[in-house]
Image (cartoon, grey):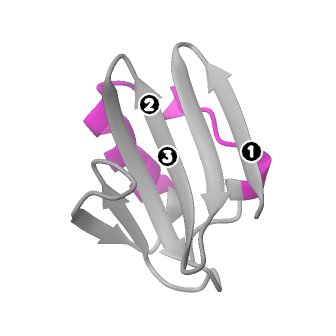
Amino acid sequence: MTEQTRTDEGITARYYETDDERMLAFERDGSSAAIAQNRDGYAMLKVRSSPDGDELERYYGFDMALDHAAELLGVDSATLPVPESAEDMGM
C-alpha cells in the first residue's frame, strides 16, 4: 500500500490506497474532508466529509474536488497540501 502524508499551514493531507479506492484525506482543527477515486484511477472523484463518510458530490476534475474539500475545511484550495502520489487524481 502506498501512503504519503504532507502537512502545511495546519492542514494534514494523507494519501493512501485501499483494496478499492485511492484516498486523499485532509484534517484541519477537528474538521475533515476526503477525496476518493477508484483504485484504477479513471472514475469520477467523490468528495466526502471523511474517508468513510457519505458521498457529498462527484467531480471529473481534481481542481473542483479540491475546491469542495477546501470549502469543507474553511480554507482556500491553494493552501491544501497534496502529496505527490495524489497529484494525478481526476480524469
Answer with left or right where residue 31 lies relative to residue 76: left
Report helix, strand or loop for mark 3. strand
Query: Does residue 86 belong to the magenta stretch?
Result: no
The residue identified by callout 3 is 25
Percent of width and height locating residue 52: 34, 59
In the displayed structure, 57 sits above or below 3; it is: below
Report helix, strand or loop for mark 2. strand
- Specify few, some or many for label 3: CA neighbours under 10 Å numbering under 14, 14-19, or 20 or more: many
Amino acid at dot 2: Glu
Amino acid at dot 3: Ala
Percent of width and height locating residue 91: 57, 78
Q: CA distance from mark 2 to mark 3?
A: 7 Å
The residue identified by callout 2 is 27
Q: Earlier in the sequence, mark 3 or mark 1?
A: 1
In the displayed structure, 54 sits above or below 51; it is: below
Residue range highlighted in magenta: 63-85
The residue identified by callout 1 is 4
Image quarter in which the N terminus is found: bottom right
Q: Considering depth in this image, is 36 or 74 the residue closer to the camera?
A: 36
